Structures are given as structure tokens and as C-alpha cells.
Amino acid sequence: MLHGYCPATRYLPYLAWTDIAALPDKENTVIVLPAGSIEQHGPHLPCAVDTIIAAGVVGHALARLPDSVPAFGLPPITYGKSVEHLHFPGTVTLEGSTLLATITEVGESVYRSGFRKLLIVNGHGGQPQIMEMAARELRLRHGDFVVVPHFTWRVANVAGRYLSEKERKLAMHAGHAETAIIMALAPDTVQMSRAVANYPPEFPCPTLSADGRPAAAWTARDFGETGVIGDPMPATPEQGHAILDSLAESWARGITELHQMRWPKRDAQTWGRAHQTGDVLGS
Ligand SMILES: [Zn+2]
């Protein structure tokens, strides 16, 4: 079946339209959209890492919600904008404009279905800007739509406990934390015998980059042949389960807070209406 890590009872596409039409308090029901990517993650991890993490964390968060918190998961956005990894086979990328249109149109559909709270849990570091642009566009169109564009790892979690100082500073891709959590979520896909460490050089402009992370645009091959940017070697399944547990706990709390919160409502902006095309967007 399609629901993957999401509990079947909280998977929105398993409901009939009549069930969705009849849901109580749709205005404060939280719809959660995981967003990932299909892109190389070094020789030791599958290309689906970011999608697995976003969908896995959201599924585990939804699973621990009490019945009193109404929330449903959508199928993950499986393809993302992964142009920085396109030199490696297996990377399947959308253009930024395609992803922007996709997120915006999914959001429109959520709104048209009567929901007013959408949480985007994005697991790919190459596309938070797209999520933010889509969220702002949806708010412009609908002054009563609460759209939260967020990043899977940017809530409280215990990953930092396990990471070296260098890893915390410079790792960006297929390193310690991602490897550990995939050991928990999809252990059969991890091939640690192939794992290698690889770090980018520190960015040599301390004013432009106080922490040494690249301030210039980069593509994965700029930093080496393997596609790894970090050190996966110290990762263990136990760490992965602890990291997953802490992320799921934080996201369950975040979903609960979003359900309970009230946010200012405004009439839809005339600018937003004027630039819509056709009548497919609803009102
Ligand atoms: Zn990743």
C-alpha cells in the first residue's frame, strides 16, 4: 500500500471524498506534506535518502499524536530540485520552477478541500527557498491560509550529541546524521563497507563565512568524486533510532501547537487575485 511510514488512519488519500467533506474542524486540522528528493547520497546510501527521512520522520510524528489532535499526512513530494547533484547517475531532478508550481498547486488543492493549515516538512537542503516562495504565494492568495515551510532537521533533536565539531561545521550531505537515521528507517539500503569521508575546504573568507561553510554556490562534484560531504563512518543504528525518536517527538509537538494556534486572518489580496489565471484556483 501507499502510505509507507504514515499510519494508514492518518493518510489523507485513504479517505473517500465524502469522508473528507464531513471532517469536523477542518480549519484547524493540520495537513502535513513531506518533501524530499531523489539524488545521489554517496556510494553507501540510496538516492532516496531525503524523501525517506522526510516521510519517515513525519510518519513517526503522526503515529504518536493522540486522537484529540486532528492531522493527516499527504504522500511525499518525492522529486525535488537537486541540480547540484545532477552530475551523478540516479539523481532525478525537477527545475525550480516546476517544483515551485507543484508545491503551490498541492497547497491550492489542500485549501480547496477546506483545510486551512499546511505544514511542509522538507528534507532536502537544496530547496527550502522554493518552499518559502510557495508558502508566501499561497498566503497572498488566501488570507486565511496558514502555511508553514520548514526543514526536517530544524527542530530540537539529539543528532548534535553524536557529531564531531568538524562534522557539525562542514558536513552537508550523506554524512554522520543522515547515515545514522537511514540505518534506523531503511537499514537494508545502507552499505557501510563502501562509506568514505570527504569534507569541503573551509571557505577562505571569514567575513563572508564565519563558520567556514561554503558561501559561494557549489555543486557536489566540486568537493570530490564520491558525492559525500561529511563523515558517515561513526554512524550507528542506535544513534539513528535516538535521532529519529527525538525528531518525531519534536514534530508531534509542532503539529499539536499548529493545531492549537490561531493566526491573523486577512482578506485575500487583490494583487494575488489579479495575477491568477483561469478559475481553477478557487477562492
Ligand atoms: Zn540528503
Image (spheres, helix red, strand yellow):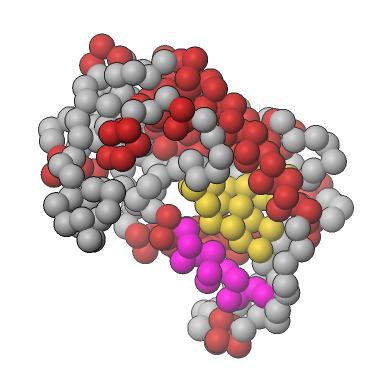
In this rendering, position of residue 134 left or right of residue 190: right
- Ligand 1 quadrant? top left
Tally of marks: 0
Q: Is residue 142 magenta?
A: yes
Q: Position of residue 16 (x, y in %)?
A: 76, 44
The range drawn in magenta is 131-143
Q: Nearer the viewer, residue 141 or 119?
A: 119
**Residue at the spot 16% in from the left edge and 57% down from the top edge:** 205
Q: Could you tell me if residue 112 is visible in this image? A: no
Residue at 34% over, 50% down? 126
Q: Is residue 10 magenta?
A: no
Q: Please, is residue 187 above or below residue 204 in the view?
A: above
Task: Choose top left, top right, bottom left or bottom right for residue 60.
Answer: top right
Figure quadrant of the N terminus: top right
Left or right: 254 in relation to 211: right
> Which of the image's four quarters has the C terminus?
bottom right
The residue positioned 65% from the left and 73% from the top of the image is: 142
Residue 265, given in percent of the width and then of the height, sits at 73, 74
**Residue at the image position 69 percent from the left and 58 percent from the top:** 117
Q: Nearer the viewer, residue 224 or 96?
A: 224
Comparing 18 with 113, the one in front is: 113
Q: Position of residue 182 (x, y in %)?
A: 43, 24
Relative to 74, does residue 227 appear above or below in the rendering?
A: above
Residue 19 at x, y percent in the picture: 81, 47
- Would you identify the image quadrant in which residue 229 lies? top left
Tell me which corner region of the image, top left, top right, bottom left or bottom right, holds residue 162. top left
Q: Main secondary structure of the magenta part?
A: helix
The reply to whether residue 245 is visible in this rendering is: yes
The answer to whether 13 is drawn above or below residue 136 in the figure is above
